[in-house]
Amino acid sequence: MALKDVATNVDDAFTRDGYRGMAFENAFSGALSFMRRRYSKDLTGVDLAVTGVPFDQAVTHRPGTRFGPRAIREASTLQPMDPPYGWDLNPLTDMSVADYGDLAFDYADIPAFPQALTDYIAGILDAGAGSLCLGGDHYISFPILRAYVAKFGPLSLLQFDAHSDTWPDDDMARVDHGTMFYKAVKEGLIDPARSVQVGIRTHCDDYMGVNVIDAPEVHATGMEAVTKKIKSIIGDHQTYLTFDIDCLDPAFAPGTGTPVSGGLSSAQALGILRGLKGINMVGGDVVEVSPPYDTTGATAIAGAHVAMELMCLYCANLLSRK
């Protein structure tokens, strides 16, 4: 296909042949899927399944992230006409990517949600694909990690965030987007000594042994120094990457539940992610995009670009191991 195909190319989410290739559908029209990938519940031959988790019942402040997956998909329609900038690979052509739709769950049965999500991700992994989840609030990372650890064993966690999310909470049944990484360490899901939190700028008494590169350090030392430090900590360890959009300063991502000033710029975040090429990333998510507070769409656009960078990191790791 070429750019001239915008005149006839329509509804790639359903009409695309296969899982690879660019898309030249008009950005303002057509059925929405992430990066115009084909919707499929059959993951045969799929390398990466992009899926939405529209859950926001764990928030401590402003709700609305249940609308995040839809908004990120819409924002992503601006990107699949061109290869990702700054990369020598293209996940849209170099691997098979499907939009797996959204997790279905009973919104009124919150206690059942964690296991439902764990089982859902386990199904993706059992099919031989990795997952890239679009949230949803940040609690979703916890049930996802359980599925990943069941397959891979304890992981390194690479977390971009304004908050550590390691506040104490020994009630494993509580559903809270501020305590799940405390639980993840307690449960042995992540190796804190080989895990990193980037962009932190809120106080926490105990980071549970996880390495912290706070926002002031990012600003003071620069992107290259940050990527080198991250790589020195996680090494070749299998890594789950979670990106809370509030890692970005509210100037770049106002549409989120708990915004904190002094964060990373979108340029800093994308630069760091690109510098991480070569990490052993096995899965990831982009969370906390809240469209009701995103009046210009800037937050969803940032979320879609971050998600593409995560796809690139996953693709680079996949290609290096073939």
Image (tube, grey):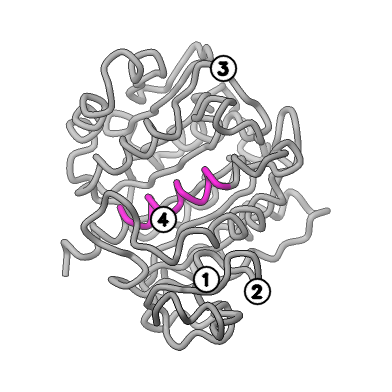
Mark earlier in primary sequence (2, 4): 2
Residue type beneath disc 4: Tyr
- Asked if residue 120 lies left or right of residue 274, the reply is right
Identify the residue shown where x is 49% and y is 25%: 164
The alpha-carbon separation of the residues under discs 2 and 3 comes to 36 Å
**Labelled disc at residue 261:** 3
Identify the residue shown where x is 35% and y is 17%: 219
Above or below for 281 versus 73: above
Q: Is residue 167 visible?
A: yes
Instruction: Provide residue 1's location: percent of width, then percent of height.
Output: 40, 82
**Labelled disc at residue 31:** 2
Mark earlier in primary sequence (1, 4): 1
Residue type beneath disc 3: Ser
Question: For the magenta stretch, what is the residue range?
Answer: 301-313
Question: Which-is-in-front pick, marks 2 and 3?
Answer: 2
**Labelled disc at residue 148:** 4
Q: Is residue 305 magenta?
A: yes
Reading the image, the residue beneath label 1 is 36
- At numbered mark 2, what does the secondary structure look like: helix, strand or loop? loop
Identify the residue shown where x is 59% and y is 53%: 72
- Asked if residue 269 lies left or right of residue 34, the reply is left
Quarter location, residue 65: top right
